[in-house]
Amino acid sequence: MEPFLLVFNTCPDEDTARRIARTLVEQRLAACVNILPGLSSIYAWKGDIEEGEECLLLIKTREEAYGALEKTLQSLHPYELPEIVAVPIAKGLPPYLQWIQESTSP
C-alpha cells in the first residue's frame, strides 16, 4: 500500500464544508471527510488579528491523490487563501488503510 495523508482544511460554514466534502468523495479524491462545526479560529491576516467560527474538515486520502485534491479544494473554496495542510498517516488499522486505498483509486 502507498502512503496516506490526513489533510486539514477550514471552511466558513457547514454548507460550504458539506459541498466541498461531497465533491472530494464523489471525485474519489478522498475516502472520507469528517466535518467538525463550531471551530473557533484566531489568526493573523493582512496586518490584523481576526477571529471567527469555522468548520474543520479532516480529509483522508492517498499521497498520490494529493495534487488533484489540493487543486480541486482550491477551486471550490471561497477563501482567498484556504488552509490546506497535510500530514502523513504513520500508522493505521490495515483494513481501514486498504479501504482508503480502494476508495480513492481510479
Image (tube, rainbow, N blue to C red):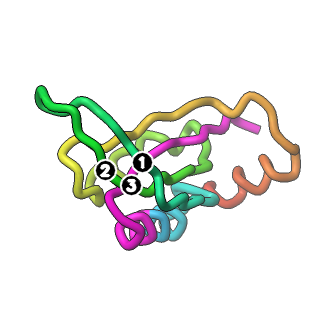
Q: How far apart in space, not on screen, are marks 3 and 1 (Cα)?
A: 6 Å
Q: Residues within 10 Å of mark 1 (few under 14, many from 20)?
A: few
Residue at 61% x, 38% y: name it: 5
Mark 3 vs mark 1: give the one in front: 1
Tag shown at residue 6: none
Q: Secondary structure at mark 3?
A: strand
Task: Judge by depth and name the residue closer to the eye, 74 or 48.
Answer: 48
Q: Residues within 10 Å of mark 2 (few under 14, many from 20)?
A: few
Whether label 2 touches label 3, CB < 8 Å? yes
- The residue singled out by tag 3 in the image is 54
The amino acid type, in three-letter code, at marker 3 is Glu
Q: Residues within 10 Å of mark 3 (few under 14, many from 20)?
A: some
The picture places residue 95, in percent across and down from the top left corner, at 87, 51
- The residue singled out by tag 1 in the image is 40
Q: Is residue 67 left or right of residue 34?
A: left
The amino acid type, in three-letter code, at marker 2 is Gly
Q: Read off the magenta span.
A: 1-20
Whether label 3 touches label 1, CB < 8 Å? yes
Whether the magenta-drawn stretch holds residue 92 is answered as: no
Q: Secondary structure at mark 2?
A: strand
- Of the 4 image quadrants, the one containing the N terminus is top right
- The residue singled out by tag 2 in the image is 52
Whether the magenta-drawn stretch holds residue 17 is answered as: yes
Whether label 2 touches label 1, CB < 8 Å? yes
Give the mark nearer the N terminus: 3 vs 1.
1
The picture places residue 76, in percent across and down from the top left corner, at 29, 60
Residue at 23% x, 39% y: name it: 50
Mark 2 vs mark 3: give the one in front: 2
Q: How far apart in space, not on screen, are marks 2 and 1 (Cα)?
A: 6 Å
Give the mark nearer the N terminus: 2 vs 1.
1
Residue at 36% x, 52% y: name it: 73
- Of the 4 image quadrants, the one containing the C terminus is bottom right
